[in-house]
Image (cartoon, coloured by chain):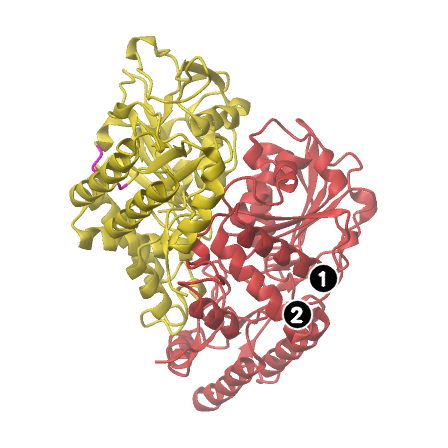
Chain colours: A yellow, B red
């Protein structure tokens, strides 16, 4: 057997060069005579690793100095709850934009901790999420603690073509599936957060980039471990962090710098997405992606066969061809290919070649 | 260079056999043609891994069926907050036993979420923690949500010689540094919890073993991701779990079963601790451990040189001799050796040999 092209939506493929380095030094990291998993997070070597990871991320994303960078646990899902705990006073409200599954989840997990209001829900008359909604800055409650949206809906394959305007209210963006895929103007945001398991590293890690003045908000009574400001003061070492996950994230950041940075990744990612959408759109209806072209995701491409009865054959044959994890999410069915940074262009070419061949044989 | 004996208190040494297996299959796990880090937590392979990990843990510890086993994120520190959120009604109190640093932290992190009361604080007149306190079951508030204690204080090296009696109130035990080191009567507890990074696996994972009737308690308004019952219903797959950490924990559980189980580990761990305490006690005052012998930890052995001016030489020379991470915790100074399951008897023998030689040369 050998490694195949892995289109999993998350936990997702990691760059093979990163995995090979981790494998080579898994038992002895640097001069430590121990695995990176076995050294103290208070030791000089690991503290230097965290500092380098943060510096590389700041350089890649152009994160201004008045933003803190936090490496936390619990994935993006836990941040759905920590957002209102940290940013909203008791009784205060927050506005939410709903554009698919994950922005709905953010509302549901936030509800016990803040008075949520759905500013706009992009579902069409049939309940489908096929486009990023317009956000009217004038409609945002000026007393809201924040406006939350999800920049890319991993399941529905719907991405905002531009960062929405939240007016004077801090904008909070869930970037779990699109962070680091292209440049982003961080200064537009109050908070950017992301689970790691798509474009950053393995699962078990969450990244929070937060404007420092927001750390001064009292929020709600809560333990220190649930308090962003406490993690910021401690440089993400408030308590034992997920050391191996941070180590792998650091290797991914270094790999992205070697690749040339986010402008280069953006060009690659755009080519990958275009190749796949072309294969779908040019298939004379054999394959179909119903998302409004202006809102199509570069990272997650759901698609459907004209005959759903062919799904099982498509999945079995693609797997045999070395193309993994193409099954669609159970919520909407069909097929899906995720094209995160670690997916090489050759992988997308192999997929579109397979799709063309499959269509010729079954069409 | 080569791997050395690593006495780090945590993140701690892992069994070398476990690391070698992880290294061998880091790029291709089983038949997956991808790393275990790169596969879906909803896929059959990973679901089977979680089920096997839970089954092995239940077998090792003899966990009764009326207890749920949860693999969570955030380490033990986050559980300090989740305990009262899940177990205490708004306004209800909880009793705490304080026997050192970590039981103090449990009180501090719990305070925003429950009316805490310190039932007993074992500090002596000088503020030192040198023995496990007596716990008077009759003194526990019968209306308390639970009685919390820390079975082994990692920093102070103080361990309860027996499980305390909490009467009719559920007993909650922090077993972060002693879980799996010997058999335990799980049925004595309402909740057993532990951070993984000492005796279970890498950091970034927490284990919670909770009697199922306690999952029925309403607790306090909170997000699903902070709710044990939701994680129990989802079989620890409520949201993306820390997949690599769970994988390594599963390898550790399998290794413990191969070693012969917890009775065998108890005998080994007792011999390791006795050897080190003998080396200290028989040093004619060159080394010193002031903990009451009945409360001495098998897992964490803090000790002091008669002349603190020799600390730097001890640390430098021991490191050169292949004995790592013997510096004491910054809170109490001195030296410390942690002897978790992964530390072989040969490592403790190498340490006591070094200590004898160092005493002869410097005494």
Q: Earlier in the sequence, mark 1 or mark 2?
A: 1
Quarter of the image for the N terminus of chain A: give it.
bottom left
Quarter occupied by residue B91:
top right
Range of residues picked out in magenta: A180-184
Residue B16 image label: none
A230 to B272, vertically: above or below: above
Report helix, strand or loop for mark 1. helix
Q: Identify the residue under disc 1.
A: B59
Report x, y in % for residue A238: 43, 47
The answer to the question of whether label 1 and label 2 lie on touching residues, with beta carbons closer than 8 A, is: yes
A60 to B313, vertically: above or below: above
Magenta-span inclusion, residue A62 = no
Report helix, strand or loop for mark 2. helix
Tell me if mark 2 has few (under 14), some (14-19) or many (20+) residues whose alpha carbon lies within 10 angstroms of its own: some
Q: Nearer the viewer, residue A188 or A296?
A: A296
Q: Which residue does the image show at 38% across and 64% down from the upper left?
A: A2
Magenta stretch mostly in which secondary structure?
A: loop
Q: CA distance from mark 1 to mark 2?
A: 9 Å
Report x, y in % for residue A27: 41, 71
Q: Nearer the viewer, residue A59 or A154?
A: A154
Report x, y in % for residue A34: 41, 71
A168 to B210, vertically: above or below: above
View extreme (top): residue: A138
Whether residue A18 is visible to the viewer of this picture, yes or no, is yes
Q: Which residue does the image show at 41% across and 46% down from the upper left?
A: A8
Magenta-span inclusion, residue A183 = yes
Q: Identify the residue under disc 2.
A: B257
């Amino acid at each position: 057997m050998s490694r195949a092209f892995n289109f999993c939506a998350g936990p997702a493929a990691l760059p093979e060069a990163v995995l090979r380095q981790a494998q080579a030094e898994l038992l002895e990291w640097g001069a430590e005579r121990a695995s990176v998993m076995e050294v103290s997070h208070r030791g000089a070597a690991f503290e230097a690793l965290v500092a380098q990871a943060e510096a590389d991320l700041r350089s890649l994303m152009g994160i201004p100095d008045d933003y803190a960078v936090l490496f936390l646990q619990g994935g993006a899902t836990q941040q759905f709850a920590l957002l209102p705990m940290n940013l909203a006073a008791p009784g205060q409200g927050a506005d939410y934009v709903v554009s698919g599954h994950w922005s709905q989840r953010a509302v549901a997990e936030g509800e016990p901790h803040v008075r949520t209001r759905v500013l706009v829900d992009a579902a069409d008359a049939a309940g489908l999420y096929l486009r990023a909604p317009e956000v009217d800055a004038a409609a945002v409650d000026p007393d809201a603690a924040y406006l939350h949206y999800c920049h890319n809906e991993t399941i529905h394959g719907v991405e905002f073509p531009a960062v929405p305007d939240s007016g004077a209210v801090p904008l909070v963006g869930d970037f779990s599936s699109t962070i680091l895929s292209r440049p982003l103007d961080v200064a537009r945001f109050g908070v950017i957060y992301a689970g790691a398991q798509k474009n950053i590293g393995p699962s078990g890690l969450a990244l929070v980039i937060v404007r420092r003045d927001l750390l001064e908000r009292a929020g709600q009574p809560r333990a220190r471990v649930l308090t962003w400001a406490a993690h910021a003061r401690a440089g993400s070492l408030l308590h034992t962090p997920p050391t191996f996950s941070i180590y792998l994230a650091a290797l991914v950041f270094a790999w992205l710098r070697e690749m040339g940075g986010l402008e280069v990744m953006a060009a690659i990612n755009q080519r990958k997405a275009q190749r796949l959408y072309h294969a779908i759109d040019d298939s004379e209806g054999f394959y179909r992606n119903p998302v409004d072209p202006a809102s199509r995701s570069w990272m997650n491409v759901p698609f459907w066969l004209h005959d759903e009865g062919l799904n099982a054959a498509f999945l079995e044959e693609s797997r045999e061809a070395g193309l993994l994890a193409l099954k669609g999410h159970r919520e909407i069915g069909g097929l899906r290919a995720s094209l995160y940074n670690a997916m090489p262009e050759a992988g997308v070419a192999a997929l579109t070649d397979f799709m063309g061949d499959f269509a010729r044989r079954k069409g």
